[in-house]
Image (spheres, rainbow, N blue to C red):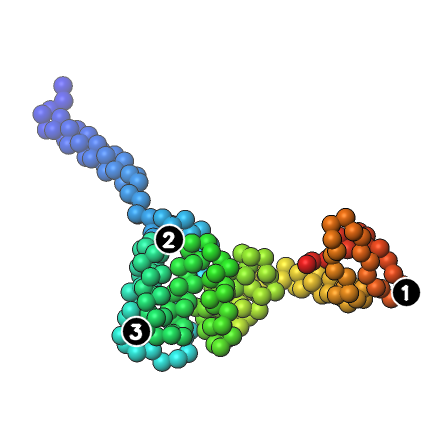
Amino acid sequence: MPSPLSSRRNTAAALFILIVVLTACGGTTPEPKAPPSGFERLGVPTEERAFLVDPLEGYPLVVAAALEADVGGLYRTLGSGDQAAAAAGAASLLAENPGFHPAQVLLAQARFVERRYDAAREMLTPVTAELPTYTAAQLLVGRVAEILGDLPAAYAAYGQIAAVSPLAAESGVAMRPRATASTRRCGAVAWIRRRLNWPAWRPGRRGRRRRWRVPGGWRRRGRMDRLLWRP
């Protein structure tokens, strides 16, 4: 018959094993998920969020401390998911400081979040023309052009800032084969149009056939016209 001392030891050992098992099971409990970011709530894909950097990133001109604080606050507002307030604030900054580039970039970022890619590109074109190494602007220009299918423009934008932006350098390297192929196709089409003297042809009234001048004589509108001509 076991002694009372050995019984107490067995009970203590069993309790210790039970505590270890319960602790191990408790350690596998999944941690609660972090709340979604503002860009997630707005539906911005993960791969595109990296292109929405601080509008002051890479800005080569001097900015007053008050304006810098305003831009930073509005950028955080955009990141929190309130693109309407961010766009309104950027427009207000532009009204008070016409031509203030970071405000233009911030407004373009708000349009990008709204998926108004053409509007974002239109806003950024004069900015990058004036400041070709402005990182925040060129990153967004490159991404917008890529989304719109203008691969040569996207590749050129990334190339302007590849030396200072690892994201731009990586994106440019990844898309180089596609951008090169697109450029070659555009060049081939342009060469064909020049050979066919394309501007001489214009569409006529409905139901009326037109012809264009090519080296060697007149030819009727045909398959090449349907494939290559653009109004």
Q: Amino acid at mark 3?
A: Leu
Query: Mark 1 Cα within 10 Å, few/some/many (few <14, many 20+)?
Result: few
Mark 2: which secondary structure?
Answer: helix
Q: Earlier in the sequence, mark 2 or mark 1?
A: 2
| Front position in the image: 119 or 109 | 119
Residue 101 percent coordinates (x, y): 41, 73
Query: Mark 2 Cα within 10 Å, few/some/many (few <14, many 20+)?
Result: many
CB contact under 8 Å: marks 2 and 3: no
142 left or right, relative to 67: right
Q: Earlier in the sequence, mark 2 or mark 3?
A: 2
Query: Mark 3 Cα within 10 Å, few/some/many (few <14, many 20+)?
Result: some
Residue at mark 3: 67
Residue at mark 2: 39
Q: CA distance from mark 3 to mark 1?
A: 65 Å
Residue 11 percent coordinates (x, y): 15, 28
Q: Amino acid at mark 2?
A: Phe
Q: Marks 2 and 1: which is nearer the front?
A: 1
